[in-house]
Image (cartoon, rainbow, N blue to C red):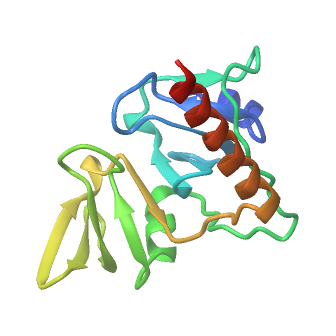
Amino acid sequence: MNKEMLHSLVNSTIKVDRGGPESRVGKLLAAAEDHITVLTAEDGVIYYYTHHIKSLTINAKNEVQLDLQVPEDFVFIQAKDYRSVLKGLQYKWVKINRGGPETLEGIMDEVHDDFITIVSNEEVIRISMFHMRNISYGVKIEKSKDDENANKNDEKAKKQEGNKK
């Protein structure tokens, strides 16, 4: 994807891909040479390798909602390229390829030029860098108690409506 176009979308709410297991809605935090950084409500910070992104949808008519306030002191890994992001995630618990059969979670052990090593349970797994669509780690924004209470109240109201029918 065009780097200038990606930079113009920073701080916008976007949807990565149109659907499927890798599709996510979030705030575009940064755009670099070969990856973008997206903050989502469910998964926290996700780094997408841009050559695997099929489409980006901009929140033009507020149809894509993101119920998330980013604190001013929020910190995430910023790097010039995807490999440098991976180096910054070394020895952290990560999740690779968010959905589908290629999902993997574990500790990022080593980062090489063309593969990474993940330790998951009692397995040592080597993954080709080319086939990594995205990666995330444990940084999430906690929802305020008011947000959680509002969500619980909304769920209760929906259940009550369903019981009336």
Residue at horizontal 76%, vertical 49%?
150
Q: Nearer the viewer, residue 2 or 67?
A: 67
Q: Position of residue 30 (x, y in %)?
A: 68, 49
Task: Identify the residue at image location x=45%, y=74%.
Answer: 87
- Horizontal side of 53 relative to 138 (left or right) equals left
Specify whether residue 21 is in view: yes
User: Residue 38 at what x, y percent from top left?
Assistant: 60, 48
Residue occupying image coordinates x 44% and y 34%: 23
Residue extending furthest right?
Answer: 72
Extreme residue in the front direction? 164
Q: Quadrant of residue 3?
A: top right
Which residue of the protein is positioned furthest toward the left in this rendering? 123
Q: Position of residue 6 (x, y in %)?
A: 66, 33
What is the quadrant of residue 135 in the picture?
A: bottom left
Determine whether 108 is above or below 49 in the image: below
Q: Residue at x 71, y 57 (%)?
A: 148
Q: Quadrant of residue 106?
A: bottom left
Residue positioned most to the top = 61
Residue 165 against residue 43 in the figure, above or below = above
Question: How many dots with numbers?
Answer: 0
* Figure check: 129 above or below 13: below
Q: Is 36 left, or right, of 48 in this rendering? A: right
Residue 26 in view of the camera? no
